[in-house]
Image: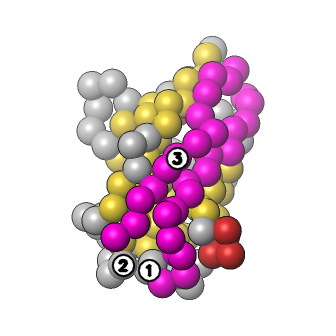
Amino acid sequence: QVQLVESGGGLVQAGGSLRLSCAASRSISSIFAMAWYRQAPGNQRELVASITHFRTTNYANSVKGRFTISRDNAKNTMYLQMNSLKPEDTAVYYCAADNIRVAGPYEYWGHGTQVTVSS
């Protein structure tokens, strides 16, 4: 079992930056895959980025070149650095973790943090 808590969301103008954090309740060194998902009103939850234990990363096409996912096993924390934000990035962002697979479905989820990008 692991509990995940997101932080770092907020209101930012288009073109700005935010860094989201996902703090885990225990060591993440043994967790195979972690990811960020987002869900905008009226839309399905979508994968934003994922990272494996081996630091292999994957990004949605819509965020490539703007977002960077990382994990710090020593701090039991995963991050999402978001630059050049656009209004269409507005959503609730969730972190997720799974001990076995990176492609999902993920077993553990946080409660989400709101990101709002104004135009």
Could one spot residue 64 in this view of the protein?
A: no
Viewer-nearest residue: 108 or 12: 108
User: Amino acid under label 1?
Assistant: Phe
Q: Mark 2 — residue?
A: 99
Q: Mark 1 — residue?
A: 32
Q: Residue furthest top?
A: 119
User: Amino acid under label 3?
Assistant: Glu
Q: Which corner quadrant of the image does residue 33 belong to?
A: bottom left
Q: Which corner quadrant of the image does residue 22 belong to?
A: bottom right
Residue 100 x/y as whole percent: 32, 81
Residue 36 x/y as whole percent: 47, 54
Residue interval drawn in magenta: 1-30
Which is nearer the N-term, disc 3 or disc 2?
3
Q: Give me the residue at 68% from left, 75% from top.
A: 74
Q: Which mark is residue 6?
A: 3
- How far apart in space, not on screen, are marks 3 and 2 (Cα)? 19 Å
Q: Which mark is residue 16?
A: none
Q: Give me the residue at 59% from left, 61% from top.
A: 78
